[in-house]
């Protein structure tokens, strides 16, 4: 028991897995589990399991670490919260914090907001997404191409739960000026856009989306392998 109290979450991965978990639940109300050091000690494969045993106080603390200057702490905090959000709705309570990050001037914070809003949309029974979708989609015109691509890719986590936003999302996607994106990222960004539009078109066939896809396939930004893959997704 003493060993577990000293090592916290990290200790769970160095002792008998079954006994460690029983011991953890015995003491979880007696100790503060998470520290920055313990978070960084958890292996990549251990984050998913760690996400299942953190408590409310841990989550509150990890959310504050999203502002840490140390990128390693920020990244691990983000990954832990993303893993937690897969199966539990308690990270959703911090929706206002994530929504505020969408308006940040800091690209890293904006990306964090994008990813955690997307990860928690599945728990958004009150449709709070309707209040922030414009701020979310405004990231599509961000000067940082990484933010733009993160915004597009994360839409895959929103679409299954918010079909009423299909039209709005599609309109914003086809309005993106590919020429304004860094030349190195243009092809990848276009593929990201097309992959999202392929999901939208499965249940909704607006002429504008079909025209956008047709023009992309007729253009020269995509190579033949890209075009073949996109065409394969259409049927």
Image (cartoon, rainbow, N blue to C red):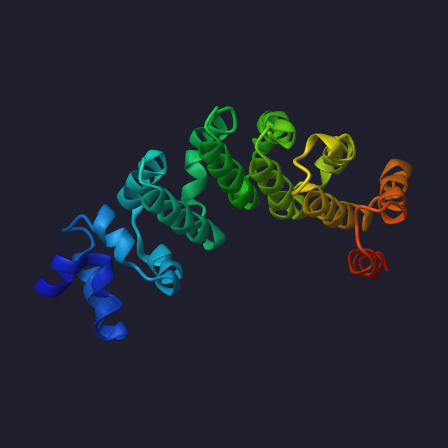
Decide: is 37 above or below 148: below
Q: x%, y% of residue 202?
A: 81, 51
- The quadrant in which residue 140 appears is top right
Q: x%, y% of residue 62?
A: 32, 42
Name the side, left or right, on which 128 lies relative to 38.
right
Q: Residue at x 47, y 55 (%)?
A: 87
Name the side, left or right, on which 83 lies relative to 37.
right
Q: x%, y% of residue 92?
A: 45, 40
- The quadrant in which residue 162 appears is top right
Q: Residue at x 56, y 42 (%)?
A: 118
- Tell me if residue 212 can be seen: yes
Please identify the quadrant where the N terminus is shown.
bottom left
**Closer to us: 181 or 156:** 181
Decide: is 148 above or below 43: above
**Closer to us: 235 or 226:** 226
- The quadrant in which residue 25 appears is bottom left
Q: Residue at x 28, y 52 (%)?
A: 39
Name the side, left or right, on which 219 lies relative to 1.
right
**Closer to us: 83 or 57:** 83
């Amino acid at each position: 028991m003493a060993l577990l109290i000293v090592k916290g979450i990290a200790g769970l991965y160095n002792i008998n897995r079954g006994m460690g978990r029983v011991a953890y639940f015995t003491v979880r109300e007696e100790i503060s589990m998470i520290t920055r050091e313990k978070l960084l000690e958890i292996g990549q494969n251990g984050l998913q399991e760690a996400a299942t045993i953190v408590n409310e106080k841990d989550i509150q603390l990890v959310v504050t670490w999203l502002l840490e200057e140390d990128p390693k702490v920020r990244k691990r905090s983000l990954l832990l919260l993303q893993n937690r959000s897969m199966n539990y709705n308690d990270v959703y309570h911090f929706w206002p914090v994530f929504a505020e990050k969408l308006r940040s001037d800091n690209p890293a914070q904006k990306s964090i907001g994008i990813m955690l809003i997307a990860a928690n949309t599945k728990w958004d029974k009150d449709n709070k997404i309707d209040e922030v979708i414009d701020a979310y989609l405004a990231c599509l015109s961000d000067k940082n191409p990484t933010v733009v691509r993160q915004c597009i890719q994360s839409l895959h986590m929103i679409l299954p739960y918010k079909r009423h936003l299909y039209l709005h999302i599609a309109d914003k996607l086809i309005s993106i000026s590919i020429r304004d994106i860094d030349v190195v990222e243009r092809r990848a960004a276009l593929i990201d856009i097309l992959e999202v539009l392929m999901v939208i078109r499965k249940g909704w066939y607006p002429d504008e989306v079909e025209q956008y896809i047709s023009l992309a396939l007729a253009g020269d930004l995509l190579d033949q392998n890209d075009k073949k893959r996109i065409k394969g997704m259409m049927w």
